[in-house]
Each structure stands twice: as C-alpha cells, then as structure tokens.
Image (tube, rainbow, N blue to C red):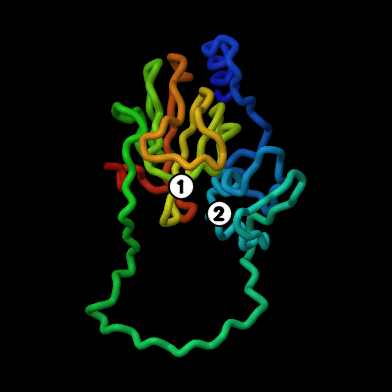
Amino acid sequence: MGLLLVGMIGCATQGRPVIAERKQPPPFRKVDTYIVSRGDTLYSIAWRFNQDVKTLAARNGLRAPYTIYPGQRLRLRGSVPKRSSTPRSRPKKAKPPAETRAPSARKSSLTFSWPVKGKPSREFGKGNKGLDFSLPRGAVVRAAASGRVVYAGTGLGGYTSIVIVRHGGGYLSAYSLNTAVSVKENDEIKVGARIAEIESTGRAAKLHFEIRRDGEPISPRSVLR
C-alpha cells in the first residue's frame, strides 16, 4: 500500500519533488536496539517505536538538544541509568491535608484546533492511533497548536512524509501525508500555520493525524476544540 501511494503522488505532483521513502524497520517490530540512519532525529525514532523521547534520551545518556548521528546504536529497551551523583538532602516539606492536595490525574490547559475541515473518515481506536481524513485537492493542513517542528522528513507507516511538532506539557502532534510539506525542522510555528496543501485526489489525498502525550497516543478528540 505504501509503494502504491508513493507512486500515485509522484504522478499527481507532475514532477514536483517529493521526499523519497527510506527503508526502516516497521513501527510494530519489537527490537532492542536501533541504528541511526541519515535524516533521523530522536523524536522520529521515539515516535516510530511508541516511546517517550525523554525516557529514550535518558536510556542512552543523551541530553537536549538530543544530537544523534548516523551509525549510532540506540538502546530501545532496558532500565534508565541512575545518576551517579548524590543529590543534596533537602528538608522535607509537610504534605498538605488530603482535601487540599492536587488530583492525581494530570490536567492540561493545552487545547488543539482541528488540522483540517471536515469529518474524519476513520476514528481513533481499533488499531488506529489517530484520526484519518480523506481530503479534496487544494485542502490545506494546518498546525493544530503552536510549537516547534522536531521532525519533517520521510514518512512513517507508509506515508510519503510526516511532520512532528513538539508542544508544551509533553505533547507531540504529527501529520502524515502523501505530499510535500511547507515546514522544516526547528521551525517555530503558530496554531493555524500551514503544514501542507493536498495536491492530488483519490487514495493519495489522505491525512493521518496523531497526538501523543509522554509518548502515548491519545484520542485527538479529547483535546481538540
């Protein structure tokens, strides 16, 4: 299916450059290590293997801005090393009474806007980690929230290209498309910023939209407004 879609979008764009797909292990393959390829970022690797980027960085002794290089071997599984230095002892603070403590469930004020107009063709759940949209030619895909582009390159999961945006509160959003995109890595973008424009029709005119919190896919509808 992925090769069919790439072929279709190549014809639809009439010679316009489209990012070529790179051979990489599928996201469902259980492996213990991953060898970094050209164009990878730690965010794209964490996304592929459904991991929290901070945990993956700590497991491999990486610090922000998480610089990696081709040929580097990353541990995908295993415990996170403990810090060797002993933290200074601090006086313990008295816990507030039970009735005044903050609730255990984390709440966030961050909300997202719909990336495109129209109803999803496939909902979150039953093996789908996001929302799928069938779009007409000329439809514009927009950023669902403000943030920084941490990956814009080869598609994951059969799509030609993908854009991953980091937001506050441990949130990431991703836009998988079969068309060229309008942003690049490290761009600071605002909500509503143009991500891409659909340039074809049929099976290639698709958008797969995901939102993850601390590496875990969540229903986009739970935060979309």
**Quadrant position of the C terminus in the picture:** top left
Q: Position of residue 167 (x, y in %)?
A: 44, 49
Tally of numbered tags: 2
What residue is shown with label 1? 172
Q: Position of residue 27 (x, y in %)?
A: 58, 42
Residue occupying the far left of the picture: 99
Disc marking residue 88: none
Vertical position of residue 18 compared to residue 106: above or below: above
Report crowding for label 2: few under 14, some 14 to 19, many 20 or more residues within 10 A (C-alpha). some
In this image, 195 relative to 53: left or right? Answer: left
**Residue at point 54% right, 53% down?**
51
Q: Amino acid at mark 2?
A: Val
- x and y percentages locating residue 7 in the rendered image: 58, 16
Query: Residue 44 or 184: which is nearer the viewer?
Result: 184
Q: Secondary structure at mark 1?
A: strand
CB-based contact (under 8 Å), mark 2 and mark 1: yes
Q: CA distance from mark 2 to mark 1?
A: 10 Å
The image quarter in which residue 86 lies: bottom right
66 shown above or below 106: above
What residue is pinned by disc 2? 53
Label 2: state its secondary structure.
Answer: helix
Picture residue at 32% right of the left edge, 47% below the top? 111
